[in-house]
Image: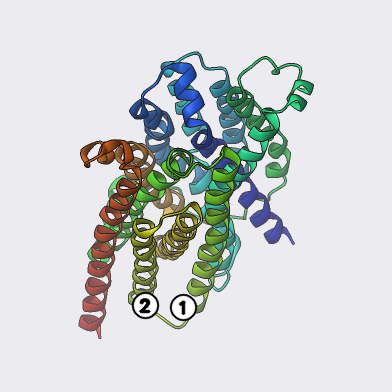
Amino acid sequence: MLGSYTVAVLCLTLILSFIDRFVINLVVDPIRSELGLSDVEISLLQGAGFALIFALAALPAGRLADRMNRPRLIAAGVVVWSLATISCGLSTGFWSFFAARMVLGFGEAALIPAASSLLIDSFSAARRGTALGIFSLGSTSGSGIALIVGGAVLGYLGTHNAADLTIIASLAPWRQLMIVMGIPGFFFVALLLFIPEPVRGNRLPPPPLQLLRRKLVAEGGLVLRLCFAKGVMSLADFGMAAWLPTLLLRHYSATPVAAGAIVGIATALAGIIGSIGGGILVDWSAMRCGIPTRAKLILGSYLVALCGAILIALSSSSLQIGIAFSIWVAGSVAGSVVGRVTMQECVPGNMRATTVALSITISAIFGIAAGPTVVPIIAGLLPDAGNALQPAIVVIGVVSVVPALLLIVRSASRVSAASAADS
């Protein structure tokens, strides 16, 4: 029962973190209009404002998670990012909004490293994949639920019923949305503090960075390759998630509620398939197959994502784009789950949170910081820049998945060659 409680609460907390992170994507144009921002400045708020501190704080947070009580560390982060989300709704310009997004990133930095290592320590090898897969539902469902719930809340705030919210009734709807979304986090703190910290026994403290580096480059740099493959995939993950709602609003005449529902449902349903499917595949291969087989599972998943990117290029309606994007999400998420379990099993227990933190740092730099900004830059370089948002989203998908495939192929070939030599 405690194991199920741990998975459920951590998954819900991850959903909450992604809601607070992604809800900005639904109110891009109102924020830009009221604060007088450009598309590039908005993309910096979506990406770099959050990712700068998120990337810098992830590794120290991972080291902390390898030596202190992880549920308490996560609870402290929830308080910080909830306050930051509320502060976003009170921002008066670009720089105050940017600062609030940086604090949001600081608060969220410890969650995934601490939670991932907590789950690996709480479950046996035959159940880790499923546990981590269920937890990963939080990331994919979180971005989807952010758009679904955010769109619904925004719709409510746009009606006369919002006058019932007397304290914030005079604020613009996008400001009300940010403040309302920041409140639930404070109720999660008690739930997190009831999660037991697994007995660590004679577990060693985090190793020196030099020893960690040697482990990361072992077996042809397998762990580093997995980290960078996930990182380059994140470029498209976050770039697409940031701009698909705006694409539907600008070029397919969707309402905020409809855009949120289409992208949100596509993300959530595909995320469930990718997370659970990837976790089941990991557990199935745990006792039967080696790392080369795991690499093939990742390759297959990323090829599915590539098909989704190509289908976005061929789409001519909101529904078609939603279906194509769901194919991308399913492939990307499944590959991420298999890769995250694999990289943690390749290092000792006292390196797991730090290893996940390294992966998050790389993903933050490639994905959260660069992804939302690269899309409008690509669109500006294409012919008919005003209508180039859809082609730009396709380009970032292809540019991301191809190097990820090459990294995984080289990993599989290096490990296979090493295994053959040992035999």
**Relative height, residue 200 to residue 32 (above, below):** below
**Relative height, residue 41 to residue 404 (above, below):** above
Q: Is residue 14 visible?
A: no
Q: Residue at x 60, y 47 (%)?
A: 145
Element under label 2? Answer: helix
Judged left or right of residue 291, residue 16 is right
Q: Position of residue 421 (x, y in %)?
A: 20, 81
**Relative height, residue 246 to residue 80 (above, below):** below
Q: Residue at x 33, y 46 (%)?
A: 362
Q: Position of residue 155 (x, y in %)?
A: 66, 34
Residue under circle 2? 293
Q: Residue flagged by tag 1: what amino acid is it?
A: Ser
Element under label 1? Answer: helix
Q: Position of residue 91 (x, y in %)?
A: 52, 17
Q: Residue at x 24, y 58 (%)?
A: 403
Q: Is residue 333 visible?
A: yes
Residue under circle 1? 285
**Relative height, residue 280 to residue 155 (above, below):** below
Whether the residues at callouts 2 and 1 have beta carbons within 8 Å, the answer is: yes
Mark positioned earlier in the residue sequence (2 or 1)? 1
